[in-house]
Every structure is written in C-alpha cells, then in structure tokens.
Amino acid sequence: QAHLIESGGGLVQAGGSLRLSCATSGRDFSGYTMGWFRQAPGKEREFVADLTWSDDVPTYTDSVKGRFSISRDYTQDMVLLQMNSLKPKDTAVYYCAARWPTESEYRYWGQGTQVTVSS
C-alpha cells in the first residue's frame, strides 16, 4: 500500500524558514510527478509546487516563486519543500501528493503537516 508521509511543519515567525519533507513508501514512485498543495482555514486546497520525477523540472504557483524550492532526495525517496521568507498568508496545512505524468488527477495524498507563520 502506497504511503506519503509529510513532516517538518511547525510554528515560525514571519521571515523565517521551514523545510517540509515527504517520505514515500509502499510503491515505486519513480516516474511520478510529485506535488505540494496547501489548504488554509476556510479556503480551498491550492497548488503550491510540483516536480517531475524524470527531468526535475519544477513548477510553482506565483505567490511562492523565489521563496519556495521543491527538490527530491534520491537516497531516501523523499520530496522536499524548502520555504524561505515565510509570510502569515503561507499559514496552511501542507500536503504532499503524487500523480502519474499522463494523468491530471493526483492519486496519492499524505495526511498533511501544519505550517503556521506568525506576524
């Protein structure tokens, strides 16, 4: 059974940094596009960033460009999200997800990790 497990969330002051990790298990996610999404209280879940497994091409939503960086750790089968210059509006539950590149829907989701940015 496939699992995605996020970690690294927490409370940080505005301007600070956090690094989220997504550990994969239960299947080989080679070839999958890995993404990060977030959901703030009272809002819909939104796309943050993704990374194609085959060519490491990242995509970011405009609001995080230049501040967030998605990457992967080959040795530990993990996907990372480095978040710098955090703002209160970045406060949300962050989710890791995976989809096959030819599909539009993300099939696998983690349980989420809370990120809270104080002003």
Image (cartoon, grey):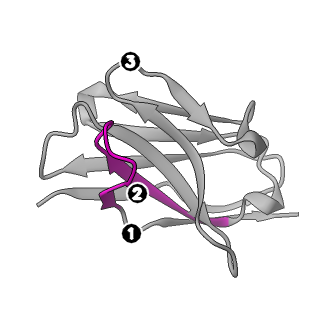
Q: Quadrant of the C terminus?
A: bottom right
On the image, which quarter does residue 79 sit in?
top left
In contact (CB < 8 Å): disc 3 and disc 1: no
**Along the line of sight, which residue is nearer the eye, 14 or 29?**
29
Earlier along the polypeptide chain: callout 3 or callout 1?
A: 3
Q: CA distance from mark 1 to mark 2?
A: 7 Å
Which residue is labeled 1 in the image? 111
**Along the line of sight, which residue is nearer the eye, 43 or 71?**
43
Which residue is labeled 2 in the image? 6
Callout 2: helix, strand or loop? strand
Which residue is labeled 3 in the image? 55
19 above or below 112?
above
On the image, which quarter does residue 34 sit in?
top left
Give the mark toward the camera: 3 or 1: 3
Q: Residue shown at 32%/22% (left/top)? A: 54
Dot 3: within a 10 Å radius of its alpha carbon, few (fewer than 14), some, or many (20 or more) residues? Answer: few
Q: CA distance from mark 3 to mark 1?
A: 27 Å
**Residue 87 at x, y = what percent?**
81, 54
Dot 2: within a 10 Å radius of its alpha carbon, few (fewer than 14), some, or many (20 or more) residues? Answer: many
**Residue 60 at x, y = what percent?**
63, 37
Q: Amino acid at mark 1?
A: Gln
In magenta, the rendered stretch is 92-109
In contact (CB < 8 Å): disc 1 and disc 2: yes
